[in-house]
Image (cartoon, grey):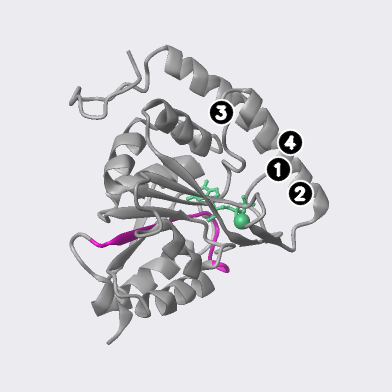
Amino acid sequence: MPASTQTTAATPHLSIIIPALNEERRLPPTLARIDDFLQTQPFTAEIVIVDNGSKDATAEYVRRYAETHPEVRLIQLAERGKGRAVKAGMLAARGDHRFICDADLSMPIEEVVKFLPPDSDGYSINIGTREGPEARRIGEPYYRHLMGRINNLIIKIMGLPGFEDTQCGFKMFSRETAEDLFDVQRMNGIGFDVELLYIAKRRGYTIREVPITWYFDPDSRMRLVQDSLNMLREIWEIRQNWKKGLYARRSPDGANSPAQP
Ligand SMILES: Nc1nc2c(ncn2[C@@H]2O[C@H](COP(=O)(O)OP(=O)(O)O)[C@@H](O)[C@H]2O)c(=O)[nH]1
Ligand SMILES: [Mg+2]
């Protein structure tokens, strides 16, 4: 049976959300590998690709691909930013488990099962980590790892201690958690991971770090200096937003309620 018929469902078990900026080269092999993988799995899945600002043929490629793969959807937004793209994808997704997945598939997609039940049982959020003895980083130049460690130290000092790798592009949210957190997300750029974890911790969500195998890809949409500065500014903004009560839930439904006054 082709994957397309096997994996379409009103409420899929898994949603894979791929933010894509100028990914006409990396997306085709990524989608092929995900498709091959899903065909070996018993569960239903959908793939939501969010493009904002691509100057290449990313959108055209996805549109064509979706014609033969109904489990694939394209969302296009006018304004730029990975954070903005992930938020739109997470809120448009329908799955019980919603996974952020970089288009370079620098984590082999087979590892996604580590983020799903039964492994993830008891945790609302499962975040990939490239640190620790069980993780493997392959091909990364020393200076890039060092920069990542400095960024992580700054993130810890500035207000989000407890995570060895907030910036990994592979994270799973349960449906309820995704709908709760992405609704109040405000960071459109690089700070969005820190923002989500910052709010999640204060709302008392259970968060698990999942060691992964990760392949360094020198092709990056990140600008090292500019984005590091943006990160500092955004962490400062996150703290200000929290103090101003800007992360309060829209509807005071009570359950699981936290944190914001
Ligand atoms: N939609 C969208 N995706 C983005 C944007 N910036 C980065 N991405 C995506 O975010 C993911 C991670 O980017 P990548 O270049 O691999 O970053 P790195 O691995 O952190 O160096 C890729 O899927 C990119 O296409 C953006 O502004 N909009
Ligand atoms: Mg990458």
> What residue sits right under mark 1 in the picture?
148
For the residue pair 79 and 1, the one nearer the viewer reads as 1
Disc 4 vs disc 1: Cβ atoms closer than 8 Å? Answer: yes
Q: Quadrant of the C terminus?
A: top left
> What residue sits right under mark 4 in the picture?
150
Residue labelled 3 has its Cβ within 8 Å of some atom of ligand 1: no
Is 102 left or right of 250, judged from the image as shown? right
Could you tell me residue 104's position as x and y percent?
A: 57, 63
Disc 1 vs disc 2: Cβ atoms closer than 8 Å? Answer: yes
Identify the magenta region: 12-26
Is 214 left or right of 209, judged from the image as shown? right
Q: Quadrant of the N terminus?
A: bottom left
Q: Is residue 203 in sight in this rendering?
A: yes
Q: Is residue 60 above or below residue 182?
A: below
* Residue drawn at the location 63% of the way across and 57% of the way down: 135
For the residue pair 121 and 185, the one nearer the viewer reads as 121
Q: Is residue 186 in sight in this rendering?
A: no
Q: Earlier in the sequence, mark 3 or mark 1?
A: 1
Ligand 2 lies in quarter: bottom right
Is 134 left or right of 5, judged from the image as shown? right
> Whole-Å distance between the Cαs marked 4 and 3?
14 Å
Give the amino acid type for the residue marked by disc 3 in the picture.
Leu
Asked if residue 13 is among those painted magenta in the image, a careful observer would answer yes
Give the amino acid type for the residue marked by disc 1 in the picture.
Gly
Could you tell me residue 247's position as x and y percent?
A: 36, 23
Disc 2 vs disc 4: Cβ atoms closer than 8 Å? Answer: no
Q: Which mark is residue 144?
A: 2
